[in-house]
Amino acid sequence: MTTTLTPSPTPVTRTSPPEGFVMPDFGDRPVASGAVSGAPTGTPGTDPAGAGQAAYAGPRKMAFICSKGNLDMAYPALIMGNAALSEGVEVHIFFTFWGLDIVNKKTMKDLKFTMLGNTAMHMPELAKLRPGWEHKSLPQGKGGLPGMTSVATKMMKKQMDDLDIPDVPDFLDLLQAAGAHMYACRLTFDMMKVIEADLHPGVEGVISASDFIEIAEGAQIVFV
């Protein structure tokens, strides 16, 4: 006699959005495994059928456009891309204009951080001198002093290292190993006189903006 065991349904955990938060409507979501066919979809945060459909699925493909080569502008896409990969999201990253420095082996280790033009520059260490100073923006004029860019860059790298965040080359290796798809912009590649041997090995190709638009079809696009 053969007995068939029916697995218990997996409980669905829902997290309510913060008060006042408006969840974007990305349209109908794919029906999750175990959900009742024909159950209403497209309403974030609800599961009318109670059949195990995900409370919020959202897009499962993300495309990042990196257009800046400053150290502080390199990390946002790398960190978000890594987080997306850990959630099973398909990730594509397009490096264009100064953002090409992020994947150029001749420049990726020497990206700079500057105070100039950054009115949100704070120094947590100033709290040791006087509480509250850590929240004050540093004077822009100090950023133009000789050596200040090197000091600011060194400070930011130390802060990232204290948080166990890898430097840019290691982060690119991490993304490559995790399955991220990375591309260099053809226009920038030609304009900067870069050769393919200069690019990080994780860069899959040198493509045009039109090519990337086709690749990014259906993706959530993040411009940095």
Image (spheres, grey):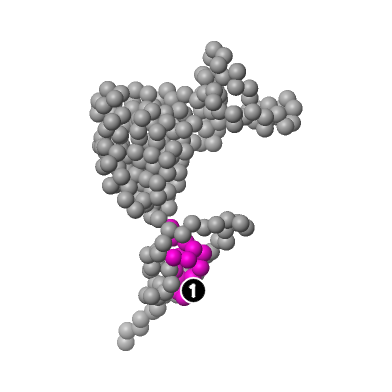
**Magenta part of the chain:** 42-58
Query: Is 165 on the left or on the right of 122, as rendered?
Result: left
Q: Residue at x 44, y 38 (%)?
A: 224
64 versus 103 height, above or below? below
User: Which of 182 and 170 lies nearest the eye of the viewer?
Assistant: 182
User: Which of 5 and 97 lies nearest the eye of the viewer?
Assistant: 97
Question: Looking at the picture, how far across and down is residue 30, in whole percent?
Answer: 37, 65
* Quarter of image, res 132: top right
Q: Residue at x 55, y 57 (%)?
A: 22
Question: Looking at the picture, how far across and down is residue 217, in whole percent?
Answer: 32, 50
What secondary structure is found at the residue carrying circle 1?
loop
Q: Which residue is mark 1?
A: 48
* Quarter of image, res 152: top right
Count numbered badges in the picture: 1
Amino acid at dot 1 = Pro
Q: Is residue 62 magenta?
A: no
The residue lying furthest to the top in this view is: 146
The residue lying furthest to the right in this view is: 130
> Would residue 30 be visible to someone looking at this image?
yes
